[in-house]
Image (cartoon, helix red, strand yellow):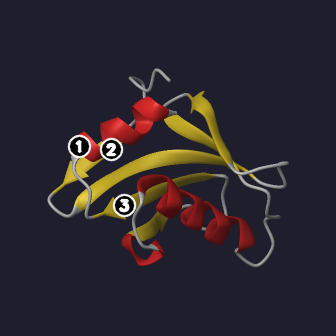
Amino acid sequence: MDWQGLDFKVAPDGISFKIKVQPRASRNAVIGLAGDSLKVCVASPPVEGEANQACLAFFAALFGVAKTRIVLVSGQKSRSKVIKIMGIDMEQFKTVLDML
């Protein structure tokens, strides 16, 4: 996948990036870019934070980190969100994105 337009920030403790979430999808998946955000489908509905939790769990599995290492920085009640993955570097980030 060409992820060159993705808006992300590298910090000493991890990487944060924008996502656009589509809840109630048939499966959990990254389906491409939507502007400067990764477009992510999650099967959970946007009720009581279920879609947020499913999204964080999906990224934890995708990047091979514990769920506690993924933080929702902004967008609790929006489809546009910023998440931060702690404990990964740019090389790991690129490797996972290149596999998508």
Q: Which one is nearer the viewer's eye here, 24 or 62? A: 62
In the rendered image, residue 14, in percent from the top left (x then y), is placed at 25, 59
Q: What amino acid is at disc 3? A: Ile
Label 2: element kind: helix
CA gap, disc 2 and disc 3: 9 Å
List x then y, in percent, for residue 39: 62, 39
Between marks 3 and 1, how big is the CA–CA gap?
A: 11 Å
Viewer-nearest residue: 11 or 77: 11
Mark 2 or 3, nearer chain start = 3
Tell me where residue 64 sits by quadrant.
bottom left
Q: Residue at x 59, y 30 (%)?
A: 32
Q: In screen coordinates, is 85 left or right of 61?
A: left
What residue is disc 1 on? 90
Q: CA distance from mark 1 to mark 2?
A: 5 Å
Q: Which residue, given by chain and number where applicable, does mark 3 sit on?
A: 85
**Residue on which disc 2 sits:** 93
Q: Position of residue 60 (x, y in %)?
A: 48, 63
Asked if labels 2 and 1 touch by Cβ distance under 8 angstroms, the answer is yes
User: Crowding near pointer 1: few (<14 within 10 Å), some, many (20+)?
Assistant: few
Does residue 12 appear to the left or right of 71 in the view shown?
left
CB under 8 Å between callouts 2 and 3? yes
Question: Is 9 drawn above or below residue 34 in the view shown?
Answer: below
